[in-house]
Image (cartoon, helix red, strand yellow):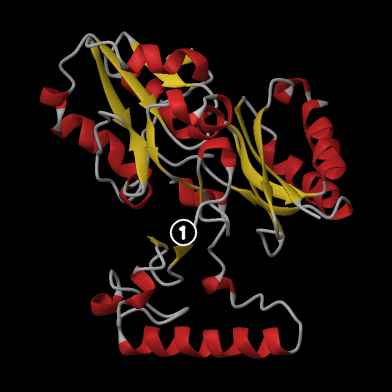
Amino acid sequence: MTYCVAALYQFASLPDYVNLRAPLQDMCDLLEIKGTILLAAEGINGTIAGQDENIAALLKFLRADPRLAALEHKESRAEIMPFYRMKVRLKKEIVTMGVAGVDPNETVGTYVDPTDWNALISDPDVVLIDTRNDYEVEIGSFEGALNPNTQTFREFPAWVEANKDKLNKPKVAMFCTGGIRCEKASSYMKSIGYDDVYHLKGGILKYLETVKETSGKWNGDCFVFDQRVAVKYGLAESDYDQCFACRYPITEADKDDPKYLQGISCHRCYGNMTDARRDRFAERQKQIALAKSRGEDHLGRKADRKVGTTDQHE
């Protein structure tokens, strides 16, 4: 048995979003769906997993609201359930930029289908920007894309302000994992005066699902926000693991480094970790091993449960 993993979002005016939380949580629980969904006045964003028919039922439930009738979603497969629980959360933004007045419901760039993306980014008049964070870009990106080297999406506006000299072509094209960050980024770029702005419809995930590797301009793997860690062309799971402490993707070769301790640290974060934090992670790893020996899932403390949360898109 495999699970359907659905990444979904839609910018829509939801002034009553607080009242939507409870019935949505109840429906997810009823359908035995797990993952995270964010609700805000500007729309909905989430990644969930469950049986195919249950995911289809939830999507139908959401799209029954006329404001979410055009809800965007991408599907992939997972061999094991990639989430521990279901959480519907209330947020100020469904993807946090922190800039007042940026509203994709009002202004947004031009959507580009994955089948037309190669032609666009091959245009010499286009500057291409990867709107994702540094740890995502590190394992894969499109040929020729600028890397803002951001740690959170909040840093993107400051990067634009500091790098206007690099944005010196008539057209700006942007992309992200599922389409939500680049859609908001395109709205921001339009708001500060860039006229010819484009973004990849459905994000990298839709591109990897649609475009064959033999003709693709994507190099590497695509980081995803669940326990699969990353996917490649055809949305097949890649071979990356993830460091529990710093969340960076790691390879099997990285695990040979003496600074890698399962569930505790990797070569990136080893030198920046306090003894107290190292001890806490070591105890958590011990509890995971004990739970596994009993045939149980270890859910952990709230502070430790970050893998697979949609707000990591920030």
- The crowding category of the residue bearing disc 1, from other C-alpha atoms within 10 Å (few below 14, some 14 to 19, many at least 20), is some
- Give the residue at x 37% y 77%: 265
Above or below, comparing residue 89 to residue 177 in the picture = below
Above or below, comparing residue 81 to residue 289 in the picture = above
- Give the residue at x 56% y 46%: 91
x then y, percent, for residue 239: 49, 57
- Give the residue at x 36% y 25%: 174
x then y, percent, for residue 212: 52, 27
Q: Does the image show residue 110?
A: no
Above or below, comparing residue 218 to residue 274 in the picture = above
User: Image quadrant for the N terminus?
Assistant: bottom right
Q: Would you identify the image quadrant in which residue 23 lies?
A: top right
Q: Nearer the viewer, residue 215 or 23?
A: 215
Above or below, comparing residue 110 to residue 224 in the picture = above
Q: Nearer the viewer, residue 17 or 151?
A: 151
Judged left or right of residue 105, residue 6 is: right
x then y, percent, for residue 279: 41, 90
Judged left or right of residue 172, residue 18 is: right
The residue pinned by badge 1 equals 240
Q: Would you identify the image quadrant in which residue 294 lies?
A: bottom right
Q: Would you identify the image quadrant in which residue 289 lies?
A: bottom right
What kind of element bears circle 1? loop
| Residue type at tag 1 | Tyr
x then y, percent, for residue 142: 34, 31
